[in-house]
Amino acid sequence: MEEVRIDKWLWAVRIFKSRTLAVDTCKKNRVMIDNLPVKASRNIKVGDIVQVKKSPVVFSFKVLKLADKRMGAKLVSEFMENVTSPDQYEILELNKISGFVDRQRGAGRPTKKDRRDLENFTGNIDLDDIDWGDD
């Protein structure tokens, strides 16, 4: 096996739960090789660096071996190497910490716990005390 479709490989190494998700991500230009968006039918080879945008982070994976059949999680490390830069993980960590501020669209109103967390985070800022420069 010299080449495999990128959507099959992304599914086989468990980056996506289904091949349909891998194809949809490719269609949205969120899968790249050499910083160029690729179609789901693009063939990859050993040594390619595949970048996958999963907002807000861009994950990078080096292809070590090719696979077109889904494998167990323990075998994934033989087929790819995660070469994502540490600054991308910092972005992910910051996003987790401030997760209650950036709510999912359609998630509804914030809960009472969300409101309390936000007040603790902001320190109960009194808007009357702020100098708005209207003078």
Image (tube, grey):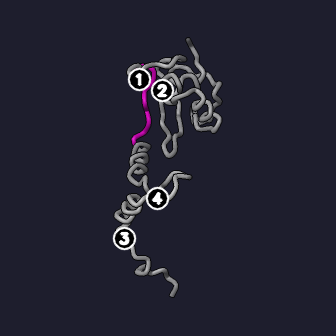
Q: Earlier in the sequence, mark 4 or mark 1?
A: 1
Q: Which mark is residue 110?
A: 4
Q: Earlier in the sequence, mark 4 or mark 3?
A: 4
Q: How many residues crowd mark 4 within 10 Å: few (<14), some (14–19), many (20+)?
A: few
As drawn, 53 above or below 128:
above
Q: Earlier in the sequence, mark 1 or mark 3?
A: 1
Query: Which quadrant does the N terminus fall into?
Result: top right
Q: Nearer the viewer, mark 4 or mark 3?
A: 4
Q: Is residue 101 magenta?
A: no
- Identify the residue shown where x is 41% and y is 58%: 114
Q: Nearer the viewer, mark 3 or mark 2?
A: 3
Q: Which residue is mark 3?
A: 124
Q: Earlier in the sequence, mark 2 or mark 4?
A: 2
Q: Position of residue 92 (x, y in %)?
A: 42, 45
Q: Residue furthest bottom?
A: 135
Q: Which residue is mark 2?
A: 14
Q: Quadrant of residue 85?
A: top left
Q: How many residues crowd mark 1 within 10 Å: few (<14), some (14–19), many (20+)?
A: few
Q: Which mark is residue 73?
A: 1
* Label 1 residue SS: helix
Q: Which residues are magenta?
A: 77-86
Q: Which mark is residue 40?
A: none
Q: Position of residue 66 (x, y in %)?
A: 51, 17
Q: Are marks 1 and 2 in contact (CB under 8 Å)?
A: yes
Q: CA distance from mark 2 to mark 4?
A: 33 Å
As drawn, 88 above or below 42:
below
Q: Are marks 2 and 4 in contact (CB under 8 Å)?
A: no
Q: CA distance from mark 1 to mark 3?
A: 45 Å
- Identify the residue shown where x is 43% and y is 55%: 100
Q: Position of residue 20 (x, y in %)?
A: 60, 29
Q: Are marks 4 and 1 in contact (CB under 8 Å)?
A: no
